[in-house]
Image (cartoon, helix red, strand yellow):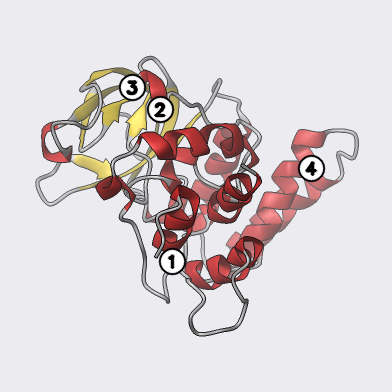
Amino acid sequence: MRSIVRSVAALGRVAFCLPFCAGALALLPAPALACSVGNDYRVPTNLELAGDADLILLGKVTGGSLGMSEGPENTDITVEPIRAIKGDLPGEAITLRGLSLSEPRFLALSNPYELVDAHPLSYIGGCIRYMFPLGTRALFFLKRGEDGDWQATGRPFSRWAEDVPDEDAPWVRLSTLYAQAAALPDAERTAMLERARDEWAAMADDPVAQLLAANVTRQLAGQNEPWNLLMQRELGLLGYPDEQEEAPASVDAALEKMRGTED
């Protein structure tokens, strides 16, 4: 059990995931665990995610398909718009295809104070979150597909869709800042982020403000590390050598280790 917990930590680095992911992995069919990325892939920063989105939408999941048994081409969820952080607020409910409502065994909400890593289900399926509890409020980062429909803007392991408890949640506040900053020229963007960081950092007795300041500092530092480099280093927790060529550096390797199915 200790090795499973350490494996999940290496995979997602999400404390919220620890009591949930180990059990969820055992319930997933093997094909659902086939997710890996190229050696040069970097998870987008929150600032990059906001800049890439055409629409950042706070919405409520009001319906959809239950589970993914019919395949992603036959599943969807319905989202009732509440507020647009970026872009124009849709005048009616939107349909997001390839997603589904959560089955009870996969019911998990985002930790409202986790502002770095993605929802835990992002690490056990097809690289992004695709299951949502009925009735949840979430902040969706969306773009227009070739067919004109809204679709996920998030690349693998990004925070493209996180549950939020209310409109003033830490993730909503950060996303609002990043959407505004991403639209500015470089120098103005940096100045805006530094002001916000300094204001929050000055609130020494407010732990949420300290989390916000720390997240802004991450954005100012630039791109994230390549995912597989990060994975290779953290897979040292599983007993793999850190710098040998044969050390697994993919999501597949960690998942196999977690399930005990490696050769």
Nearer to us in this view, 115 or 123:
123
SS at circle 2: helix
What residue does disc 4 label? 210
Number of marks in picture:
4
Quarter of the figure with residue 192? bottom right
Q: Quadrant of the N terminus?
A: top right
SS at circle 1: loop
Q: Residues within 10 Å of mark 3 (few under 14, many from 20)?
A: some
Q: Nearer the viewer, mark 4 or mark 3?
A: 3
- The mark found on residue 250 in the picture is 1
- Asked whether disc 2 touches disc 4, contact meaning CB atoms under 8 Å apart, the reply is no
The Cα atoms of the two marked residues, 2 and 4, are separated by 31 Å
What residue does disc 3 label? 103
Q: Nearer the viewer, mark 4 or mark 1?
A: 1
Amino acid type of disc 4?
Gln
Nearer to us in this view, 33 or 67:
33
- Asked whether disc 2 touches disc 3, contact meaning CB atoms under 8 Å apart, the reply is yes
